[in-house]
Image (cartoon, rainbow, N blue to C red):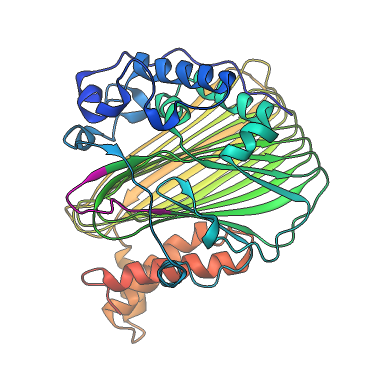
Amino acid sequence: MPTASPAPPPEPAMTLVSRRAIPFAYGDRPGPAVSSGPEWLLALRERAHARYREQGLPSTKVEDWKFTNLQPLARLNLTPAPPLPLDRARLGAVLPAGLSGPRLVLGNGRRLTELDDPAGLDAGIEILSWADAVAAAPDALRDSLDRAVAGGQPLDALNAAYAEDGLLIRIREEHKAEAPLHIVHLGSSGDEQAAVAFHPRLLVLVEAGARATIIESHIGLGGGTYWAQPVTDIVLGEGAVLRHVKLQEEGVGAVHTGLVKVTIGARASFDGFTLSLGGRIGRSEVRAVFAGEEGTCLLNGVYLGRDRQHMDMTTDIDHAVPRCRSREVFKGVLDDAGRGVFLGRIVVRPGAQGTDGHQLSRVLLLSDAAESDTKPMLEIFADDVKCSHGAAVGALDADALHYLRARGIGETEARRLLIEAFAGEAIDLIAEEPVRDHIRARVAAWLDRAEGVAA
């Protein structure tokens, strides 16, 4: 399997904010919930814990977090999340409609096997819980945790130290999975007066020549306060293909800081899409590194924010080897006093000749109080490359609105058509029709609730 590129320099030292924000993360050792297991695992957790203590919770002084302030976490007396009791009836009420196929469920970061639906799961896909993977696939877990310690991302290290459960998903060599695998993450404080945190970790290994689609839904239950801090670590072997869709619909009081890491082998392809519309703070971060030549990375997404929500899309594509291709299209729609962030970086390493990388970010502001921060970045250290980026922030096109109204379409419907078409440019890039239809429906539901845009 390919390996990641060398780690970047450490982030700035821990601040007082991080000490107040996560008190349970600051003992001499990781917490008791994760202090058991084989010696190698305990040693790696210790290293991850020390790495996080060294770096601390990211502040706005860190470039990648310049526009997203985690200060609200500092005002919470966070504790590890309790188990999430849930029955099938309640699960059925919150599951995304129209997404069929095998399903795995985690609640507050813990596997809920009684709510799984493995029907249709291909024999070529191996699925292990964290506990089973420790015994059956220790090398794979060790590699993932090593990457977390060495990778320079403090929240990745925190997750590695505190993950109580998760999944190892292996798509075996040359296997072509027919149905998408749906992973449902459910979050709840369990008590609207409490504030809890959970740190699920997924390791996805797509072996050489394999092909699969994975959908991750992050769904909030109730109006309580919680911090969801998931990490999905994806490794693609030579010629592997993975389509990954993330749907972030956390609860209104939640903070979501999700990280998807992708290592792309030779001639492998990653096609990722993110829809983000939940939580008080919703940050979805994707970091991809090419570890083999002639790889492809497609990162697309839509984020929707209102009512003082803060929505952050951060991407980093590392062209570490020659002759790889990347494309990004991100669309943001912000209403009321919603704030959106797009921070996208493409780096072309010395010697990565033949790189082809393009990035596009566009944001639509539906009110004068909405705010957008957009920062596209190209860092190029090779001369034979084709790279570009574009970014735009603005209101609805008055001429287009006038054109529709002149043809007898009411203002509300005309605005809605323009907004749906704007977001649709990114949604149309999703390969699976059922997923496209579901995301269009979620955008339509968001518009139904928007003041002045309701149907």
188 or 311: nearer the viewer: 188
Give the x, y percent position of residue 335: 25, 58
Give the x, y percent position of residue 130: 57, 39
- Please name the residue shown 57% across and 18% down the image: 39
Give the x, y percent position of residue 31: 37, 27
Q: Is residue 320 rendered to the left or right of residue 316? A: right
Give the x, y percent position of residue 326: 61, 38
Q: Is residue 117 magenta?
A: no
Is 183 situated above or below 407? above
Q: Is residue 77 rendered to the left or right of residue 51? A: left
Majority SS type along the magenta span? loop
- Please name the residue shown 27% across and 37% down the image: 79
Q: Is residue 354 rendered to the left or right of residue 146? A: right
Question: Magenta segment range?
Answer: 186-195
Image quadrant occupied by the C terminus: bottom left
Residue 150 seen in this snapshot: no
